[in-house]
Amino acid sequence: MVLKSHKETNIILIYSLFILLLHPLFQLNGKMNETDEEIYRRYLENNTEDDFRILFDRHSGNLTLFIKGFVGDIGDAEEIMIDAFAEAAAGTSAYRSKSSFKTWLFSIGKHLALKHLRRAETARRHEPDIDGEAAESPEMTLITEERSRRLYQALDSISPEYRQVLYLIFFEEMSVEDAARVMGRSRKQIYNLVERGKKALKKRLEAMGINDAQ
């Protein structure tokens, strides 16, 4: 009985030490369970790098794909994504609690992507037309890379508005209200865009030989 008691005591001590050693990990897991809004507000108050890294890890990949839907080039999309996070980190764009942090961040990304396209279009207009052909529109440059999956190929070939709304609703799982804020549309317009976008995507998938598209 005494031996068993010592074993139990040792197990408790080892377990307690294990908990102490992993305490920072448990703190991180606790933060991972917090909402974006809680983490961002704490970051603004305390300028904690760990908090902002959590937000970056959560949203950088999806934000990059969203921006790529505007600019077409993955390298440009990554740079704009960094700029969007930099703007959020600096707090230069006022965050309003009526929308989620993610919706607000994606709105910044959209604004910067459109700004990038305007600059690129201005630069193209001032370039000499060596071949005597009109410059290719931004939309026509979307189908350029990362075509390993047919779904992304099909998304790249439909209207930019359809692509954006389908990405926000089905990939990012945003609510209609949040998607409307990001795109600057009404709820009714978002519903209409979703239905038209689904039909356009289905038609494109069927043209690619995928006849079971829903």
Image: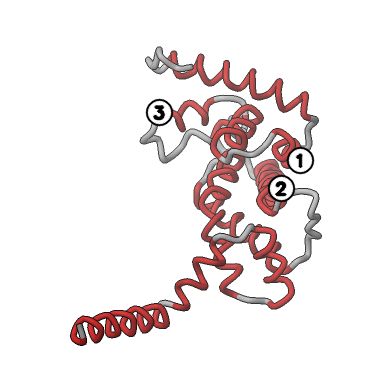
Q: Earlier in the sequence, mark 1 or mark 2?
A: 2
Please tell me whether mark 2 sits on a helix, a strand or a loop. helix
Q: Nearer the viewer, residue 13 or 207?
A: 13
Q: Are marks 1 and 2 in contact (CB under 8 Å)?
A: yes
Would you name the residue on which mark 3 appears? 150
Q: Is residue 87 left or right of residue 186?
A: left
- Disc 3 residue type (three-letter): Arg
Please tell me whether mark 3 sits on a helix, a strand or a loop. helix
Compared with residue 210, is residue 67 higher up or lower down, i.e. above or below? below
Q: Select label 1 or label 2 by which is in front.
A: 1
Quarter-wise, where is residue 31 in the image? bottom right
Would you name the residue on which mark 2 appears? 107
Please tell me whether mark 1 sits on a helix, a strand or a loop. helix
Q: Nearer the viewer, residue 152 or 75?
A: 152
Marks 1 and 3, how far apart at CA: 29 Å
Would you name the residue on which mark 1 appears? 181
Residue 116 screen position, x and y as percent: 67, 49
